[in-house]
Amino acid sequence: MPTHDRCCSIAPYFKIAEGKIGQFKQLCEQFVARASSEQKCLYYGFCFQGDEAYCREGYEGAEGLLAHLDNVGDLLQRALEIAEIVRLEIHGPEEELKKLYEPLAQYNPQYFVLEYGFRR
C-alpha cells in the first residue's frame, strides 16, 4: 500500500544555552508569525522539554520546505547564536527528499523515507 502523501517534514531538535530560553521563545513567536503566511506550510509549532526545543513542521513537498527556510533564514541564524541543533530529521516521500539532498547538505540531516500512510 504505497502512499500518495507528498508532505515533507523537518524536525530540528535544539539545545538552548543556559539562561536563554526566554530569548529563544521570543524568536519562536517570530518564526510562527512568518510561517503562518507561507502558502505551503501545513503545520508549524514549537514543543519544549526543559532546555530543549523541537520544531514540528510540515510542508507541501520539498519546494514548500525550501521556501520556508528562505523565509526564516535570518531568524534561524539568530536562534543558532543561543542554541544548537543536536538532531535534524527530514521525513517525506523519496522523490521529494531527493530534491533536498543538495540544498540541505550543510546541515547533515538524517533522512527518513515515507513508504506507507495517508493524509486527509
Image (tube, helix red, strand yellow):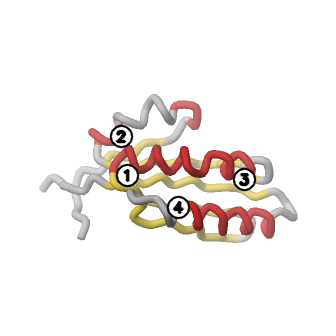
Q: In the picture provided, is 101 more to the left or to the right than 13?
A: left
- Nearer mark to the viewer, of 1 and 4: 4
Q: Quadrant of residue 46?
A: bottom right
Say which residue appears at 29% left-offset and 47% top-offset. Answer: 93
Q: CA distance from mark 2 to mark 4?
A: 21 Å
Say which residue appears at 42% left-offset and 42% top-offset. Answer: 111
What label does residue 35 carry, if any?
4
Depth check: 34 or 49 in front? 34
- Mark 2 lies on a secondary structure that is helix
Indicate which disc, 3 or 2, sits on the residue closer to the N terminus: 3
Q: Badge 3, how many Cα within 10 Å: few under 14, some, many 20+?
A: many
Q: Amino acid at mark 1?
A: Cys
Q: Which residue is mark 3?
A: 79
* Marks 2 and 4 close (CB-CB < 8 Å): no
Indicate which disc, 1 or 4, sits on the residue closer to the N terminus: 1
Q: Which residue is mark 2?
A: 97
Q: Residue furthest right?
A: 19
Q: Which residue is mark 1?
A: 8
Residue 116 place in picture, x, y as percent: 22, 56
Say which residue appears at 57% left-offset and 53% top-offset. Answer: 12
Q: Badge 4, how many Cα within 10 Å: few under 14, some, many 20+?
A: many
- Nearer mark to the viewer, of 2 and 4: 4
* Marks 1 and 3 close (CB-CB < 8 Å): no
Residue 27 place in picture, x, y as percent: 71, 62
Q: CA distance from mark 1 to mark 4?
A: 15 Å
* Marks 2 and 1 close (CB-CB < 8 Å): yes
